[in-house]
């Protein structure tokens, strides 16, 4: 998990949440960034992230080691319907393309705990 490939910002989103905010927070052992009603369902949507600056992929792997099995258990109990780890990729407006690599150790931990991986791309005015 190379420093040459610093991790981008990320969140883990949950869809189809059927337990209340306090119970979800307690079950995950992590404060929620968001918890709100789903627009088209009777369930809720929630989101967590790793607090502070994340400058090494190892921090993300360790975070997944801690929270991943809890997420998997909640999915197995049908208390949350889905989990998705969303990485933000910033693309300068003058660039032709941009890419990122998710290290296998992070992808494996996500996969083992039923967490999908997605990317969201954002055009920027600079090389941010």
Image (tube, grey):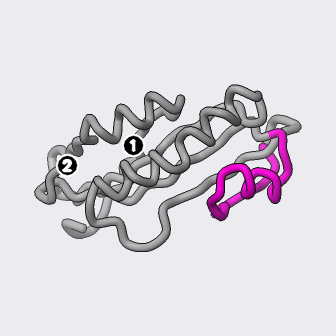
Residue 25: numbered disc: none
Quickly name the residue at label 1. 119
Q: Residue at 69% x, 26% y: name it.
A: 76
Q: Residue at 62% x, 60% y: name it.
A: 30
Residue 34 x %, y %? 68, 60
Q: Residue at 36% x, 48% y: name it.
A: 61
In the image, farthest residue toward the right: 42
Callout count: 2
Residue 51 x %, y %? 49, 69
In the rendered image, the quadrant that contains the C terminus is bottom left
Q: Is residue 120 above or below residue 114?
A: below
- The residues colored magenta run 18-38
Considering the numbered disc 2 on the image, is that residue within a helix, a strand or a loop? loop
The 10 Å Cα crowd at callout 1, few under 14, some 14 to 19, many 20 or more, is: some
Which image quadrant is residue 36 in? bottom right
Left/right of residue 123 with respect to residue 34 in the rendered view:
left
């Amino acid at each position: 998990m190379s420093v040459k490939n610093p991790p981008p910002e990320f969140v883990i989103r949950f869809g189809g949440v059927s337990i209340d905010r306090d119970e979800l927070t307690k079950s995950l052992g992590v404060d929620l960034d968001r918890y709100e009603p789903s627009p088209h369902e009777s369930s809720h949507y929630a989101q967590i992230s790793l607090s502070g600056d994340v400058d090494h992929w190892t921090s993300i792997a360790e975070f997944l080691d801690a929270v991943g099995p809890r997420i998997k258990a909640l999915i197995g109990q049908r208390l949350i319907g889905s989990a998705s780890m969303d990485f933000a990729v910033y693309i300068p407006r003058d660039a032709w393309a941009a890419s990122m690599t998710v290290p296998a150790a992070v992808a494996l931990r996500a996969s083992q705990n039923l967490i999908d991986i997605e990317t969201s791309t954002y055009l920027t005015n600079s090389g941010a």
